[in-house]
């Protein structure tokens, strides 16, 4: 009983960052995207959030980019292997697509990577793709 109480106390007192460690170890953490400042670009679109999210997934599929993980409920996708379309990056460099609903069936897509040039390139490619 004491062990359960100590575990509960530890989890309730600790920060959310501690709870993110298992995801980091498994390779499913988005913490690095949340703190990125330079490699962050935003596309505002007239699509609903769900349609914008679907467009991001279709973009990745058509460009044959590897999806590492995604969350359909929170509407984000993290993908890698961009060396197929951009030669100045490693295969392991990740780019995250985070879709946020706005008002009146509009949304915004954040394209985020720790490789600023790659993020800008993908942002430009996705912007053109969404206009189609």
Image (spheres, grey):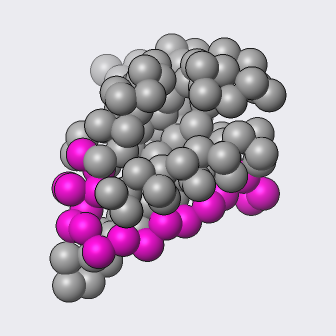
* Residue range of the region highlighted in magenta in the rendering: 37-54
Residue 59 percent location from the top left of the image: 37, 39
Q: Quadrant of residue 4?
A: top left
Residue 109 percent location from the top left of the image: 44, 60
In the image, residue 99 lies in the stretch drawn in magenta: no
Q: Quadrant of the C terminus?
A: bottom left
As drawn, the residue found furthest toward the front would be 132
Q: Is residue 33 visible?
A: no
Q: Residue at x 50, y 28 (%)?
A: 79
Q: Residue at x 76, y 39 (%)?
A: 115
Q: Is 31 on the left-hand or right-hand side of 47?
A: right
In the image, residue 46 lies in the stretch drawn in magenta: yes
Q: Is residue 43 visible?
A: yes
Residue 120's place in the image compared with 80, above or below, is: below
Q: Foreground: 122 or 34?
A: 122
Residue 22 percent location from the top left of the image: 51, 21
Q: Quadrant of the N terminus?
A: top left
Q: Foreground: 79 or 13?
A: 79
Residue 88 percent location from the top left of the image: 80, 28
Q: Is 6 on the left-hand or right-hand side of 54?
A: right
């Amino acid at each position: 009983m004491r062990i359960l109480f100590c575990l509960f106390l530890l989890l309730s007192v600790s920060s959310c960052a501690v709870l993110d460690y298992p995801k980091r170890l498994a390779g499913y953490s988005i913490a690095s995207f949340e703190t990125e400042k330079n490699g962050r670009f935003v596309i505002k679109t007239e699509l609903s959030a769900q349609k914008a999210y679907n467009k991001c997934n279709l973009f990745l599929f058509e460009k044959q980019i590897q999806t590492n993980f995604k969350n359909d409920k929170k509407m984000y996708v993290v993908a890698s292997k961009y060396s197929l379309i951009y030669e100045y990056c490693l295969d392991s460099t990740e780019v995250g697509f985070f879709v946020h609903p706005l008002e009146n069936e509009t949304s915004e897509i954040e394209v985020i990577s720790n490789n600023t040039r790659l993020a800008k390139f993908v942002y430009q490619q996705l912007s053109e793709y969404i206009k189609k």
